[in-house]
Image (tube, rainbow, N blue to C red):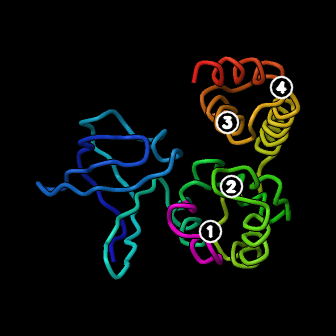
Amino acid sequence: MFAYFRGRLVSVLPEEAVVDVSGVAYRFLISATTNRHLPEQGSEVLLFSHLYVREDALQLYGFSSEEERQLFRLLILATGVGPKLALAVLSGLQVQDIHEAILANAPDRLYGISGVGKKTAARIILELRDKILKLTPVGRMAAPASLQTTRLRDDAINALVTLGFSRIAVQKAVVTILDQHMGLTVEEVVKSALVSIHNS
């Protein structure tokens, strides 16, 4: 029904954003990924949208990219995956990483995201693997630099989990660090993540 909304970013919370479009304020539920890409409050913003319709409610979901919206729409097709869990998946990993996990038949990369158990991770991959091939490619199956980042992320996460930390907390910390900094070694990512986890 709505392709996107362009307007002034009125307010931002971790899981929602309010956008003023010609005097009408729209509330969007958003992922952590979209949250990180939002401009400063008061700036112009464009959010790709999805209107989720239930018998008792209408809810707008907003995305910083068309690729993220496409993946959201795909995720909610999986058995047992509703909009809330789909946003959790998009918050836990980058769109490219989710694509790679599904195509590589690697449920362990999804398992540990908040709300995603082993059965749900396996079901997402089983039901969506063929469908995801029909989506607009995200970076056309990871350039070498992207693959290197994926290996770096996985190595850092595994090292921290081995130290006894929660995979959920570790994934969030590592993804955030890699979003903000380029060219780090595994050791540097692990050290930064330790600081982030202890301060959270």
Q: Is residue 78 in the magenta section?
A: yes
Q: Which of 54/23 is in front?
A: 54
Q: Give the amino acid at mark 2.
A: Gly
Say few, some or many: other residues with alpha carbon within 10 Å of mark 3 (under 14 / 14 to 19 / 20 or more): many
Camera-side mark, 3 or 2: 3
Residue linked to disc 2: 139
> Which residues are the magenta region?
76-86
**Cα distance between the residues tagged 3 and 4:** 17 Å
Q: Give the amino acid at mark 1.
A: Thr
Residue 138 vertical position relative to residue 147 in the rendered view, above or below: below
Q: Quadrant of residue 126?
A: bottom right
Say few, some or many: other residues with alpha carbon within 10 Å of mark 1 (under 14 / 14 to 19 / 20 or more): few
Tag shown at residue 186: 4
Magenta stretch, main secondary structure, is: loop
Residue 49 vertical position relative to residue 96 in the rendered view, above or below: below
Tag shown at residue 169: 3
Question: Residue at point 29% right, 35% down?
Answer: 41
Query: For numbered disc 4, what is the local secondary structure?
Result: helix
Q: Give the amino acid at mark 3.
A: Ala
